[in-house]
Amino acid sequence: MRVYVGIGSNIDRERNVRAALLELRARFGELAQSPVYESPAEGFVGEPFFNLVVGFDTDLPVDALRAQLREIEVVHGRDPAAHGFVARTLDLDLLLYGERVDATLKLPHPDILKYPFVLKPFSELVPTLRHPVAGRALVELWCDAGLEDGRLRRVEFAM
């Protein structure tokens, strides 16, 4: 199953993003990786975030995959009790789980179509991938969304 995960951090962000990439590679193998973007904190006053999207293959059921993503977050300092718009060492969001559509599981993740820091890197990683609900290629969705407001900045991030 091909899955896509959004990665974000605004606390010691370079170290935490690197740690997340290393941990995901160790658990799941080869990663397809988007460019990294810096974006302002959304919904609260805080340091800017680094955001990117990765894709990889897994045979894990969706709940087991999400549990592993939460485990990686906690190991790298995320407070499991913190919810909402807060600073975070690491945020790993399951964006797509194959073509699965499930509102209860929030698949596809609603942030794909809502936030430029998700859609922009995702559309660069797999531009022709079709959103399973919208039915359009990610690059088309990005071009038509009107989300570009000049607040995203691509950053050099060598791994």
Image: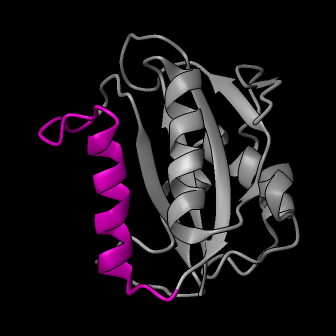
Q: Is residue 116 above or below residue 156?
A: below
**Per the image, is 75 magenta?**
yes
Q: Is residue 140 above or below residue 84?
A: below
Q: Position of residue 118 (x, y in %)?
A: 62, 47
What quarter of the picture does the N terminus occupy?
bottom right
Q: Is residue 10 left or right of residue 56?
A: left
Q: How was this image coloured? A: one colour
Q: Is residue 14 above or below residue 95?
A: above
| Residue for point 28% across, 78% down | 104
Q: Position of residue 103 (x, y in %)?
A: 36, 78
What quarter of the picture does the C terminus occupy?
top right
| Residue for point 41% across, 11% down | 46
| Residue for point 72% across, 30% down | 37
Q: From this viewpoint, is residue 72 visible?
A: yes
Q: From this viewpoint, is residue 144 visible?
A: no
Q: Is residue 50 left or right of residue 34?
A: left
How many marks are shown on the rendered structure? 0
Find the magenta span and give its range: 59-84
In-front residue for pair 63/110: 63
Quarter of the view holding residue 2: bottom right
**Per the image, is 136 magenta?**
no
| Residue for point 80% across, 31% down | 158
Q: Is residue 80 left or right of residue 139?
A: left
Quarter of the view holding residue 45: top left
Q: Position of residue 52 (x, y in %)?
A: 66, 43
Quarter of the view holding residue 87: top left
Q: Position of residue 59 (x, y in %)?
A: 50, 89
